[in-house]
Image: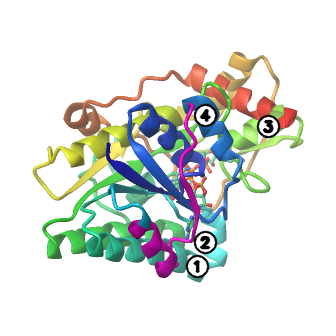
Amino acid sequence: MSRVLVTGGTGYIGSHTVVELQNAGFDVVIVDNLSNSNIDVLDGIERITGKRPPFEQTDCNDKEAMESVFVRYPDICAVIHFAASKAVGESVEQPLKYYRNNIGSLLTLLELMKAHKVENIVFSSSCTVYGQPDILPVTEEAPIKPALSPYGNTKQINEEIIRDAAYADKTLHAILRRYFNPIGAHPTAYIGELPNGVPQNLLPFITQTAAGIRKELKVFGNDYNTPDGSCIRDYINVVDLAKAHVVAVKRMLDRKADTQVEVFNLGTGRGLSVLELLNTFMKVTGVNVPYQITGRREGDIEKVWANPDKANNVLGWKAVETVEDTLASAWKWQQHLMEK
Ligand code: NAD
Ligand code: WQD
């Protein structure tokens, strides 16, 4: 069977993807420098799949160490590149760290892929490239808007690097995934999201507040042009998202695409407001989450949700998990973390 190199494979989305790849019969090798994840994640993956994935504690920017990974795993047929720094606020304060890490990693990978004749890459991009779209739900044809942060800019630049590299090298094939807002955890609660410090994202903040770790949730604004005044996002279950990566790898290995670089939105097509998500969480779990409405957060997009038709029709993939089950999985994961 073919092996998939998963960079960032001990991270949130990466770990769920490794589970789905192994369940689908793929061999993997994880490369992660553990800058934002924990080695224990391997135990969780092993508990779920019965198989401990090979792991290399390596920085994607370290070309020599990465070269050695390609040499020691000559059966790598595709790369899924999750490894990146992803904190939007930190990227504003430390832009060079973000450009170095997120762009350097991709350049190193693409150079080594060429040298080792690995022709397929799946890249983790983001709906952040659309900014505030003019038309909703947003399709892949929507214009790319100027990035609102260095983090967002690294995603745009990485997409361009991949397009340029594929133009120059007709053997290179890529699938760019524009994720909307991944939430939830594996239903076993053996793996999930591990936020570093105070969570910046909504759902980890909700679960930590529900658990009593945070005093109250701040809802950033209720004066937006939306039905209840709070911002709207497309929250997608992380396992649904992970499964979309297995489909992408198979598609590339089967050479099903008629272009070298394909772009897919990965979302549900359903927009939910902050208050809707919060109220659904409280209803599903029966746990009260104290909150107060505060001012808007700088740089927030008012509303964005995906048109997932292309992924649904071309890939035959669809997000199927309900938001209720997804929120329950996030709460189960939070409880599991507290038992540790
Ligand atoms: P994560 O931080 O949980 O996982 C990223 C992993 O990459 C971490 O385990 C980290 O240790 C590792 N890493 C970072 N830099 C590295 C390097 N130089 N070498 C090796 N390992 C490195 O993040 P995630 O939420 O799983 O996100 C995965 C990818 O998806 C990222 O590229 C992110 O930008 C993108 N994305 C995430 C979201 C989201 O909301 N979670 C949304 C859109 C796009
Ligand atoms: C969701 C909604 C907040 C926290 C970010 C990145 C984006 C992408 C996903 C990677 C917003 C509101 C949040 C809180 C709140 N990542 N909120 N109180 O902003 O859609 O996107 O993560 O590519 O690039 O920018 O996600 O989870 O931070 O916020 O009211 O304590 O929840 O205002 O409306 P966002 P988020």
Q: What colour scheme does the image use? A: rainbow
Task: Please state which amino acid type lies under the numbered disc 2.
Answer: Ser
The residue wearing badge 1 is: 95
Q: Badge 3: how crowded within 10 Å, few (<14), some, or many (20+)? A: some
Mark 3 or mark 2: which is in front?
3
Task: Please state which amino acid type lies under the numbered disc 1.
Answer: Pro
Mark 1 or mark 4: which is in front?
4
The residue wearing badge 2 is: 91
Mark 4 or mark 3: which is in front?
3
Q: Is residue 306 magenta?
A: no
Q: Secondary structure at mark 4?
A: loop
Residue 337: mark in rendering: 3
Residue drawn where x is 13% and y is 68% of the image = 170
Task: Please state which amino acid type lies under the numbered disc 4.
Answer: Gly
Label 3 and label 2: CA atoms lie apart by: 27 Å
Q: Is residue 23 left or right of residue 50?
A: left
Q: Badge 2: how crowded within 10 Å, few (<14), some, or many (20+)? A: many
Q: Secondary structure at mark 1?
A: helix
Q: Secondary structure at mark 2?
A: helix
Residue drawn where x is 72% and y is 28% of the image = 331
Q: Which residues are magenta?
A: 50-71
Position of the C terminus, as image quadrant, is top right
Quadrant of res 162: bottom left
The residue wearing badge 4 is: 184
